[in-house]
Structures are given as structure tokens and as C-alpha cells.
């Protein structure tokens, strides 16, 4: 799978691109709040959004609409942006960590592990004592357990080698998925199986403000750490020996990367389920635009991921309104053709493979 | 800066891949390491540039232990060209050379750019700056990697078969480039004639041990080459330069 070598290229300057993407993200957030199925006019939604932001007054008859905008749509849109940013950043990190452009945040088996915990709550009613937090806590807990298992199995005297990591993660993911499937088939209630399916494909339907701070802090902290190690990621992408010769400890860096990506993936998956394709596609799209240097990639990838997921989520609730599609279906349906088209056009290093 | 290997030993699964190797690279000297495949050359060099920790012995830079120094401090004085190439991420030549600045502190974007530009000019790859590294030919790649090593501003260079896969003109070019840098060099070399022409000092390694040390002229004797490489060597004079060159055929017993 050798990337097609590029002969020469002019790269888009980073600052204007980042500024444009940030503006686009702002516009997307506004669109995410104002568009929806509740029969609420856009101007109305915008006015209520503004009223909330500036501390204006809201008339009593608007209280229901205000709740829709501020307690349902806005947390959902913000959480979507956070999750998209997290998945895209982790995708970049995992691809460098296992030195494989086909890797995504889920290749380490962490999301499949989280699914076991989530389904235990959805289908078996586990951890009922935790109330509304049961799903997130259980998903995160089982993500951590899966991570510990993958780490323990993948470890070797030479540290975590890329191949062992990918093989262990993939193999254990099959195991976790088998457990999940057994739970879904064993479930007595059809509606619960549907919820489980929804979770497996990813959904932001359950977003609340309470989830936003934890997810946002984890994603921002993870991203900041990755951005600080961007040069070391460049070296690691060239090879373990090269990075050692450049003063980076590859085994230690890979261990740290494993912890950071697992923590971010676990958190993101706990609040949104396993939303596929963002973590695979966004890093590639960004590299097509600004090249492989992680210092640049890690500036754009989170913003691009956030924009993508906000729009995917918007589509997921508009297409079949008032019913909702899992957002993972949208990222795949929209993402796959776009991705294949770009790859066929030869803008991508994989085009020559 | 002086590089010393003091009793370096590497074991794997009960085998001694490198056995009590002692050698010195004086400041500015070009020291060659020759030996048959699997003799432990690469393993030994990996200990020097910290990709591997020796099981016994020490690698010393002006007396400081390489494996107890901070990794970045080592990388500021010692650069390496390992034998590996990842083909997964298509960095540009500029980005690859810029990686050489990673270990340095107190640097600015501007000083980095200037140092990298000088390194690229020195190795003749400035015109390739915006090319993708993966699109380059073998010789161009090697020159870019040397530029990266020079951008590291080291005192010592470690090269693992830098002329592998290169045609003869590029082999000569790469070695004279390294020679011209004036740095202390420890290089594993495949081609005995190239080693003879470029090295101040040669170590012959076989089965993980150094079996002969000296100037190329003293070391590359037919008896030793027969014993270590299993070939019959005939030294002849180069008709133009007068340097000793070796011609080879198989030993009669090997047939």
C-alpha cells in the first residue's frame, strides 16, 4: 500500500484556511441550532439563541421554544462539534502511532469494548443506580477495561509495536462485538435492541449540557497534548529508528499516545456511541490539503471533524424527520462517495496503490 | 567530539549478536565497519544511535554515557541515517529535513529555516524542496536524509550502509558529501573498495566481534578476507589513482 508519490505541489497556506474553517464551524453551529424538525422558525430560533447569549428577556409563551433551542439543540450541536473534533484528532494520532493510513480511532478495539458496557445498560439494565449517568459511565468503564486488555496483550519486550497493536485491537474487537451481538439477540424487548443498534452506529440524540464539559475538557486536553508532540509524531511516522536518532523515545511516545487516544476515544464514545468514518476520513482530507506535517494537520483536523459531524448530525435528524437516523450512517453515506471521489481524482497519496 | 564504544554487547535469545566491541571514532575521523551479512554491524550501530540498549558495555560521547543522557541531548550531537523507510506518509523534502531540528532548544522558525536551507544546499537538494519525499530516486532520498542529519548540526554521524541501492556515481557522491562535512563518522559499508577509498580506519566485524582493525591497507588482506568473507581477493593497483582495489572470486574450497 505505497502512497503515490507526488511530484511537486503548492500547499494551501495554513492561517487563512484555519480561519475559514473556524468561520465555517461557527456558521455550522448556528445552522445546527436553527434548523430542525420541531416546527420552530429559523428566525425565531436565531432570536432565542441571541436572547440567551446576550441575557435578553424571553416572553412566557416562548418558553417551550427556548427550551428546545437551549436545552436540546444547542447542547447537541456543541457536543457534536466536540465529538467530531475528538474523533478527527484521535484519528490523526492513531494513524501515526501504528504508522498505517488505514487506521482509525476504533482499530484499537476501544469502541467495541465501550459498546459492551453501553449495551449492558441499554439491554440488561445494568448500573441502574447511576441513573442518567449509567450509560456514559458504563461505556467509559468498559472502554478503559478494553484498553487495559489490548495493552496487556499487545505488550512485548520491544514495547508496543504497530503491527501487534493493530492485530490485537482488531482481534479483540471481534470478541467484543460477539459479546454485543449475543446481548442484542438475547434481549427480550425489541425497542431496546433498536436503542442498542442506534448506539452502535452512533447518535447524538441523548446529548445534554451535563455531558459537554467532561467531553470538551478531555478532547481539548488530548488535542493540546497531541499538538505539543506534533514534531515527535512526524518523527514517529518516519520510523522507530529514525525517531530514536532524532531524540524521541518511540516506545514511550507510543505508550503515551495509546493512553491519550484511549482516554479521548473512550470519552467520546461514551457520549455519542461509535460514530464511524470521521476518524478515518478527516485526517486524509486534511493531509490532501496541507500535507503530512502533523503540526499543520493537527490544527485543521479537529475543526474539520467538528464541521463534518455537526452537518452529519443535522442531516441525521432532518432526512427522515421526525424519525432520526444514526449519525454514523450519514457520515458513511456522505463520506464514502466524497472520499472515493477525491481518491480517484488522484489528489490523495493512496490513489496510486 | 570523540565517540567510544566500550565493550558493547547485545544478546538476543541466548545468542551474542554483538560481543564486547571496543572502538573509537576520533574527532573528524571517518571510521568504517565492514563485515558479512548478519555479522552485527546494524545491531551495533543501533546501540550507538539509541534505537537499542546494549546488554553490557557503554557508548560514550566525550566520556558521557549515551544511554543515560537525555535522548534529545544525544540527538543534538549525534545524527544517524538508519536503514529504514516508511512509505505511509508523504512528507515534502523540506518537512523531512526540518525534522532534524527537533532535538534543538532555543530555536526560532527563522533560524530553523536558514539551517535547513544551508543543509539542503550543501547536499544539493535545494531544488527538490517542495517535492514529496516518496517520489524521489534512491540517490535523492539519501541526499535528503543526509541534509536532515546535517540540519541536526551534530558532531558525529552514524551511517548504516548509506550507499545501499545506489548506483556507482551516487555511491561516490554520497560518501564524498559525508567526507566533506568534516564530522566524525561511523559507517557500516558493504562495498570493500568504497570502504578502502574513504575510511581513515576500518574495523572488520564477524560474528559480532571485531576481528581486525587498522588502516584499509593493513586490514583488507587476502588472508583475512578469505577467513571473514569466504572470498579470494586479489589486490590490484588502480591504473589512474594508484589506490589499492580488490578483485574477488570464490575460494576454491567454497566451490
Image: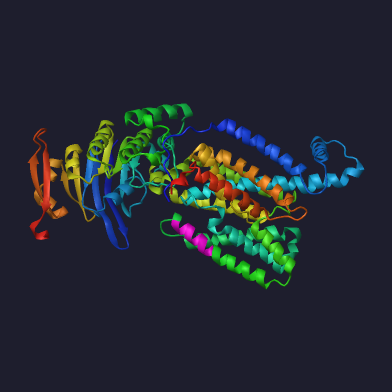
Scheme of image coloration: rainbow
Residue A151 at x, y = what percent? Answer: 51, 59
Residue at image coords 19%, 43%: B202
- In the image, is residue A273 above or below residue B201? below
The quarter of the displayed image where residue B16 is located = bottom left
In the rendered structure, does residue A165 fall within the stretch colored magenta? yes
Residue B148 visible in the shown view? yes
Residue A1 at x, y = what percent? Answer: 43, 51
Read off the magenta span.
Answer: A163-172
What is the count of numbered marks? 0
Q: Dominant secondary structure of the magenta stretch?
A: helix
Residue B149 at x, y = what percent? Answer: 35, 37
Residue at image coords 56%, 43%: A225
* Residue A160 shown left or right of residue B240 in the figure: right
Residue A48 at x, y = what percent? Answer: 82, 39
In the rendered structure, does residue A197 fall within the stretch colored magenta? no
Closer to the camera in the image, B56 or B237: B237
* Residue A57 shown left or right of residue B47 in the figure: right
- In the image, is residue A5 above or below residue B94? below
* Residue B91 shown left or right of residue B141 in the figure: right
- In the image, is residue B20 above or below residue B163? below
Closer to the camera in the image, B68 or B146: B146
Residue A126 visible in the shown view? no
Q: Which residue lies furthest to the right in this view?
A: A60
Amino acid at each position: 500500500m505505497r502512497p503515490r508519490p507526488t511530484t511537486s505541489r503548492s500547499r494551501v497556506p495554513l492561517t487563512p484556511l484555519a480561519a475559514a474553517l473556524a468561520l465555517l464551524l461557527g456558521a455550522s453551529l448556528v445552522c445546527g441550532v436553527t434548523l430542525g424538525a420541531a416546527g420552530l422558525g429559523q428566525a425565531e430560533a436565531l432570536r432565542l439563541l441571541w436572547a440567551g447569549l446576550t441575557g435578553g428577556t424571553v416572553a412566557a409563551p416562548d418558553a417551550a421554544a427556548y427550551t428546545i433551542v437551549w436545552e436540546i439543540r444547542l447542547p447537541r450541536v456543541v457536543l457534536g462539534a466536540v465529538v467530531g473534533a475528538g474523533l478527527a484528532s484521535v484519528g490523526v494520532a492513531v494513524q501515526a502511532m501504528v504508522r498505517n493510513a488505514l487506521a482509525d480511532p476504533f482499530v484499537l478495539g476501544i469502541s467495541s469494548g465501550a459498546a459492551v458496557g453501553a449495551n449492558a445498560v441499554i439491554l440488561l439494565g445494568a448500573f441502574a443506580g447511576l441513573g442518567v449517568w449509567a450509560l456514559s459511565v458504563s461505556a467509559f468503564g468498559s472502554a478503559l477495561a478494553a484498553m487495559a486488555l489490548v495493552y496487556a496483550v499487545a505488550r512485548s519486550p520491544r514495547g508496543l509495536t504497530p503491527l501487534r497493536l493493530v492485530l490485537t485491537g482488531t482481534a479483540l474487537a471481534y470478541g467484543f462485538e460477539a459479546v454485543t451481538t449475543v446481548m442484542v439477540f438475547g434481549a427480550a424487548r425489541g425497542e431496546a435492541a433498536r436503542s442498542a443498534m442506534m448506539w452502535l452506529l452512533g447518535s447524538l440524540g441523548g446529548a445534554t449540557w451535563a455531558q459537554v464539559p467532561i467531553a470538551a475538557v478531555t478532547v481539548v486536553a488530548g488535542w493540546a497534548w497531541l499538538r505539543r508532540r506534533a514534531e515527535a509524531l512526524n518523527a514517529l511516522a518516519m520510523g522507530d529508528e529514525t525517531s530514536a536518532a532524532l531524540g524521541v523515545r518511540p516506545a514511550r511516545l507510543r505508550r503515551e499516545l495509546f493512553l491519550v487516544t484511549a482516554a479521548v476515544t473512550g470519552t467520546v464514545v461514551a457520549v455519542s456511541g461509535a460514530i464511524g468514518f470521521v476518524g478515518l476520513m478527516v485526517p486524509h482530507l486534511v493531509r490532501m490539503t496541507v500535507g503530512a506535517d502533523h503540526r499543520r494537520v493537527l490544527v485543521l483536523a479537529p475543526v474539520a471533524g467538528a464541521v463534518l459531524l455537526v452537518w452529519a448530525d443535522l442531516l441525521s435528524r432532518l432526512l427522515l424527520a421526525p424519525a432520526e437516523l444514526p449519525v454514523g450512517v450519514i457520515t458513511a453515506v456522505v463520506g464514502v462517495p466524497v472520499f472515493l471521489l477525491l481518491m480517484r481524482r488522484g489528489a490523495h497519496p493512496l490513489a496510486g496503490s | 567530539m570523540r565517540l567510544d564504544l566500550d565493550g558493547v554487547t547485545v544478546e538476543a535469545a541466548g545468542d551474542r549478536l554483538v560481543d564486547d566491541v571496543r572502538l573509537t571514532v576520533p574527532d573528524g575521523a571517518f571510521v568504517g565497519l565492514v563485515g558479512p551479512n548478519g555479522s552485527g554491524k546494524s545491531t551495533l550501530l543501533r546501540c550507538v544511535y539509541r534505537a537499542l540498549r546494549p546488554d553490557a558495555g557503554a557508548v560514550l560521547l566525550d566520556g558521557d554515557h549515551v544511554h543515560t543522557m537525555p535522548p534529545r541531548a544525544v540527538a543534538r550531537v549525534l545524527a544517524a541515517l538508519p536503514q529504514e523507510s516508511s512509505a505511509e506518509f508523504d512528507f515534502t523534502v523540506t518537512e523531512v529535513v526540518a525534522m532534524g531540528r527537533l532535538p534543538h532548544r532555543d530555536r526560532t522558525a527563522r533560524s530553523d529555516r536558514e539551517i535547513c536551507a544551508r543543509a539542503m544546499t550543501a547536499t544539493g537538494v535545494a531544488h527538490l524542496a517542495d517535492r514529496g519525499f516518496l517520489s524521489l530516486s534512491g540517490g535523492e532520498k539519501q541526499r535528503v536524509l543526509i541534509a536532515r542529519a546535517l540540519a541536526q548540526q551534530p558532531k558525529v554521524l552514524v551511517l548504516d550502509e548509506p550507499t545501499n541501492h545506489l548506483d556507482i556515481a551516487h555511491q561516490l557522491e554520497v560518501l564524498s558529501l559525508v567526507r566533506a562535512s568534516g564530522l566524525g563518522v561511523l559507517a557500516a559499508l558493504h562495498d570493500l573498495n568504497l570502504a578502502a577509498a574513504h575510511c581513515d580506519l576500518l574495523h572488520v566485524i564477524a560474528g559480532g566481534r571485531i576481528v581486525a582493525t587498522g588502516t584499509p591497507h593493513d586490514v583488507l588482506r587476502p588472508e583475512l578476507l578469505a577467513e571473514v568473507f569466504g572470498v579470494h581477493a586479489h589486490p590490484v593497483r588502480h591504473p589512474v589513482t594508484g589506490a589499492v582495489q580488490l578483485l574477488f572470486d570464490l575460494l576454491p574450497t567454497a566451490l
